[in-house]
């Protein structure tokens, strides 16, 4: 099954007015309340074609949102890729040289490799070192239900459960190489209180993903306590108010294409739950791939072609 084309229902905002910022790092703006509290940050466009986060940050900056305690920062992360976004070819601007959300490994950050994304990561590293609570806003390649991702430490699970939006909290990695921003060492240390979460807001350019991005940001900010509750109230959509208790799932494994002849047994969009262990879910060359356990949730199916491509994450409910 080839990757589908999806309509672009969102309009990518002009972020050029935020280039200078006020931190000495382009496209990073911080506000300090002068009152003790955490440094809270929200990221957009870690991938340049995932524009819903840029829409949310643009709205909050235009509203003049400021913290009532601690520090609040807004970062347009991979602005280099985002500047290439073209609604007529929206998949092409995911990154420039490499996936920005896989470079957060000290050996690479401290090394001599030179890519557009590594240079930007090195610029942003002191900023992320100073952040206590981070929300990284992303979107998905299919019309999957939105989901929150944490690496899986107890502090992350507890914080994500307090945020309680969207309706699924997914714990674990499931990718193959590198580290995401949320796995960068300061956030992935069980001995401190720093927490980073990643939200997948729905299909990249669906109108609903813009709403989910803002709703998630509001629930995140509610838990941090750094903004006036009136900010949260005026920005939550009707769908974002009074959410049900989120389900918590753990990533137990994944499928990676071994051949060019990988295909799913059905056209999955993600978040399907397969009742019985041993149910065929994909075929890879002559091999039949099956669910490893009962009630197995299929997370983030990928229809991109290529040997070594992560095609699916497999999950078990834990809460």
Image: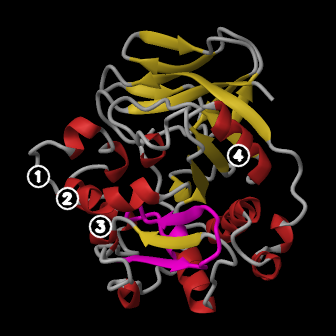
Q: Residue at x 42, y 87 (%)?
A: 14
- Distance between the alpha carbons at the discs numbered 1 and 2: 7 Å
Above or below residue 263? Residue 217 is below
Q: Is residue 237 left or right of residue 266?
A: right
Q: What's the colour scheme?
A: secondary structure
Q: What is the C-alpha distance between the residues marked 3 and 4?
A: 29 Å
Residue tagged 2: 119
User: Which quadrant, please, contains the C terminus?
Assistant: top right
User: Residue at 66% of width from left, 47% of height from top?
Assistant: 147
Label 3 – label 1 distance at C-alpha: 16 Å
Q: Disc 2 vs disc 3: which is toward the camera?
A: 2
Indicate whether 106 appears above or below 63. above
Across and down, in percent, residue 207 comes to 63, 72
Instruction: Choose the circle earlier in sequence order: 4 or 2.
Output: 2
Picture disc at residue 114: 1
Q: CA distance from mark 4 to mark 2?
A: 30 Å
Q: Are marks 1 and 2 in contact (CB under 8 Å)?
A: yes
Pointer 4 residue: 160
User: Would residue 10 be visible to someone looking at this image?
Assistant: no
Q: Which residue corresponds to mark 3? A: 81
What SS does tag 4 mark? helix
């Amino acid at each position: 099954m080839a990757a589908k084309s999806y309509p672009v229902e969102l309009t990518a905002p002009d972020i050029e007015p935020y280039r200078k910022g006020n931190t000495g790092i382009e496209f990073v703006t911080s506000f300090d309340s002068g009152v003790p509290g955490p440094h809270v940050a929200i990221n957009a466009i870690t991938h340049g074609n995932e524009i819903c986060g840029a829409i949310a940050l643009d709205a909050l900056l235009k509203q003049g949102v400021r913290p009532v305690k601690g520090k609040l920062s807004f970062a347009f992360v991979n602005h280099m890729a985002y500047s290439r976004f073209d609604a007529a070819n929206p998949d092409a601007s995911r990154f420039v040289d490499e996936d920005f959300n896989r470079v957060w490994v000290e050996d690479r950050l401290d090394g001599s490799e030179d890519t557009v994304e590594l240079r930007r990561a090195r610029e942003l590293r002191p900023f992320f070192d100073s952040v206590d609570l981070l929300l990284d806003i992303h979107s998905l390649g299919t019309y999957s239900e939105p989901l929150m991702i944490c690496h899986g430490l107890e502090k992350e699970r507890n914080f994500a459960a307090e945020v309680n939006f969207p309706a699924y909290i997914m714990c674990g990695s499931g990718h193959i190489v590198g580290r995401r921003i949320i796995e960068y060492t300061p956030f992935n240390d069980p001995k401190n209180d720093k927490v980073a979460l990643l939200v997948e807001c729905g299909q990249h350019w669906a109108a609903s993903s813009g709403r989910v991005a803002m709703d998630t940001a509001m629930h995140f900010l509610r838990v941090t306590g750094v903004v006036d509750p009136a900010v949260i109230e005026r920005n939550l959509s009707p769908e974002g108010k009074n959410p049900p208790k989120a389900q918590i799932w753990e990533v137990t494994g994944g499928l990676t294409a071994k051949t060019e002849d990988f295909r799913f047994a059905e056209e999955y969009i993600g978040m399907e739950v397969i009742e019985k262990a041993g149910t065929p879910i994909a075929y890879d060359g002559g091999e039949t791939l099956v669910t490893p356990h009962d009630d197995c949730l299929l997370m983030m199916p990928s229809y991109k072609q290529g040997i070594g491509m992560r095609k699916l994450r497999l999950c078990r409910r834990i809460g």
